[in-house]
Image (spheres, rainbow, N blue to C red):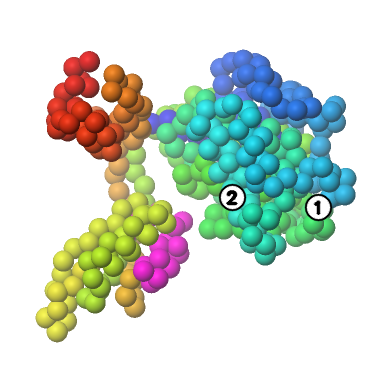
Amino acid sequence: MKILYLDCGMGAAGDMLAAALLELLPEPDEFMKELSRLPFSGIHITKEPSVKCGIKGTRFSVKIHGTEESDHVPEHHHEHSHRKMEDIRRIVCDLHLSEKIQDDILAVYGLIAEAESHAHGVPVTEIHFHEVGMMDAIADITAVCMLMDRLNPDEVVVSPVHVGSGHVHCAHGTLPVPAPATAYILKDVPIYGGDIRGELCTPTGAALLRHFAARFDAIPVMRTSSIGYGMGKKDFETANCVRAMIGETSDRTDTVLELSCNVDDMTGEAVGFAMERLFEGGALEVYTVPIGMKKSRPGILIRVMCAPSDKDRMIALLFKYTTTIGVRETQTHRYILDRRTESVSTPYGGIRRKDSCGYGVRHSKYEYDDLARIAAKLRISLDEVRNLIESD
């Protein structure tokens, strides 16, 4: 299983993440050529060698009309850079990237928009991006999303995030570190401050980490094949960099929570509706078991499996959509196969295939929805569709 580990002991910013990931590529110059061909207006993107505290790495530089922007600039200096979400969407669409990369870029901006909406008390549709709406930030986010697509890790693990301390000057004035938007994006993520004065994790960096990270944890057991150092603009007593490590793990385990409750006064339709909301909320699994309850009543055990970081959200959803007045929690250790979804081209259209392996076994299974679509179109059975695919 291919693991990407991001060490954020000095926080994270878009340019630092882009530089660290760039160092993992065998041919970084080829990627830079591809990036330079994108129709960004008025910007020049380069990679430069950089040394921090004796460690050699890469700086990712984006210059707008010959000038490199600072992380935070007073609002009146960049009135032309105040963009709304539809402006960002139009710029991204004009880049003509793959649908997946475009979706990743817009999802990152969606996290920032939600955080700004919460921090300033205005609807998402009314949010104006200041620093993160400038073209250098758009280029940083685009580069990271393209690099993630190029590296294609099976899982991204991120260390606890060092956010810094003190205050930061930005378009909205002087704000505490972490800035309100950053703090909101990193809700439920392990973060810490320290003695370093300054903003170490920017809203852009926080949103990129939140979007791509499968979990925030210590470095897993892995055989590292490549290491990259993405350097920041500022100098501190500690090397100001993001370290990216990519490698392989063998058999995989993780920790999940099981949240359970018993109900005896819900209809089948209401239980089904609640299950759908729990899946939408990020549950790994939701299932029910018929049980006998007090007063000889038949009841239903509802059990939700989720990541520890999603616990509070799952509990809130259980109380909102079921009639329970109590939820039980059990921490469990599970053994899981590595999973990957591949798109298979066939004469009948594209079909997704789920491949899983580990512990000496390997399984493959075609996506039901894709099989059903072809079966309905050709008026044949699911087994006949599988036979057609495997015989071609």
Compared to 165, does 387 lie above or below?
above
Compared to 118, does 94 lie above or below?
above
* Residue ID at (87%, 49%): 76
Q: Quadrant of the C terminus?
A: top left
Dominant SS type (magenta): helix
Q: Is disc 1 surrounded by few (<14), some (14 to 19) or many (20+) residues within 10 Å?
A: some
Q: Is residue 323 visible?
A: yes
Farthest-out residue, left: 296
Horizontal side of 344 relative to 159 (left or right) equals left
| Kind of residue indicated by mark 1 | Ala
Compared to 300, does 52 lie above or below?
above
Mark carried by residue 171 = 1
In magenta, the rendered stretch is 304-321
Q: Nearer the viewer, residue 315 or 298?
A: 298
Secondary structure at badge 1 equals loop
Q: Residue 350, how many percent across, how many down? A: 34, 26
351 part of magenta stretch: no
| Kind of residue indicated by mark 2 | Leu
315 part of magenta stretch: yes
Q: Residue 144, how many percent across, how many down? A: 60, 33
Residue labelled with disc 2:
111
| Separation (CA) of disc 1 from disc 2 | 19 Å
Q: Residue 51, how many percent across, how many down? A: 75, 28
Q: Quadrant of the N terminus?
A: top left
